[in-house]
Amino acid sequence: MKSVARPVKPKKNRFMLWSIYVLLAVIYIWALSGIPIEGFKETAGQITKAILSGILSPDWGYVYLPEGEDLLRGLLDTLAIAILGTFISAFLCIPFAFWAANNMTKGKIAAGTGKFILSFIRTFPELVMALLFIKVVGPGSFAGVLALGLHSIGMLGKLFSEEVENIDFGPIEALKATGASGLQTLWFAVVPQIIPGFISYTLYRFEINLRSASILGIIGAGGIGTPLIFAMQSRDWSRVGIILLGIIAMVTIVDIISGYLRKKVV
């Protein structure tokens, strides 16, 4: 039997591959050289031990306090911030999604303008937006809702626009051939194709917003982050432990439910 010769990779492709490896190595070295690495503090071991002991022996009495702020109220506040922020952004981003879709606007300039606006909104992280809204409306949950809602418009708008660009034009052309109006074509040919993707992306964004809402309270934007930072500042590690366990439990349950719903929708 004759041996089959293996195809030889072109030298040009190997050169490009090695060039990419070298470029990545240079970028990593440059990034590491710009970070001052001073090692761990002398108290790092003690603090780590205290945090672990707080998680292993949490303050169960903080779960529910009839007279004031407790874990359940903080988690519900965080959940409400994430739900409202996601709900607002999911509706407000729809016009931007159709605006930024190349197949729904006349001319590349119009679609490019929509994409630029969505990119501009995504430029600012939730924490920066929360700080700005705290100055405008004051500290509290409302600032957190506005921050998550505005930032999510940019993220969901981009994902929604890509979903719109991937629709099948066959049903649209069939309805137009029967004399259907533009609104009828949109409702019966476009919406059924994009709804599953929209719901899936919205649920996924809700999971992200829930994690972000847990942090926004650290800067005064409501949620469970506020009692968490107070407990850390007072070195009440048992309370820190119960708050962390509560966040882990809430996020895990929401992830399971969201994943189940996404499988049913898609």
Image (cartoon, grey):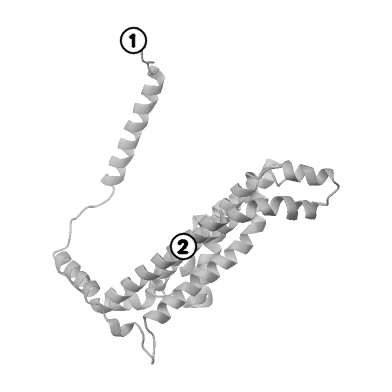
Q: Disc 1 to disc 2, how far (Cα)? A: 55 Å
The answer to whether residue 121 is left or right of residue 185 is left
Examine the rendered structure and indicate whether residue 201 appears above or below residue 76: above
Of residues 41 and 152, the one nearer the viewer is 152
- The residue wearing badge 1 is 3
Residue 202 x, y percent position in the rendering: 55, 60
Instruction: Name the quadrant containing residue 198.
Output: bottom right
Residue at position x 79%, y 54% from top?
184
Q: Earlier in the sequence, mark 1 or mark 2?
A: 1
Instruction: Name the quadrant containing residue 46.
Output: bottom left
- The residue wearing badge 2 is 207
Residue at position x 41%, y 76% from top?
75
Mark 2, residues whose alpha carbon is within 10 Å: few (<14), some, or many (≥20)?
many
Residue 82 x, y percent position in the rendering: 49, 69
Which kind of residue does numbered mark 1 sit on? Ser
Residue 117 x, y percent position in the rendering: 60, 53
Examine the rendered structure and indicate whether residue 198 appears above or below residue 103: below
The answer, for residue 121, to whether it is visible in the render is no
The answer, for residue 40, to whether it is visible in the render is yes
Q: Secondary structure at mark 1?
A: loop
Examine the rendered structure and indicate whether residue 58 appears above or below residue 19: below
Q: Secondary structure at mark 2?
A: helix
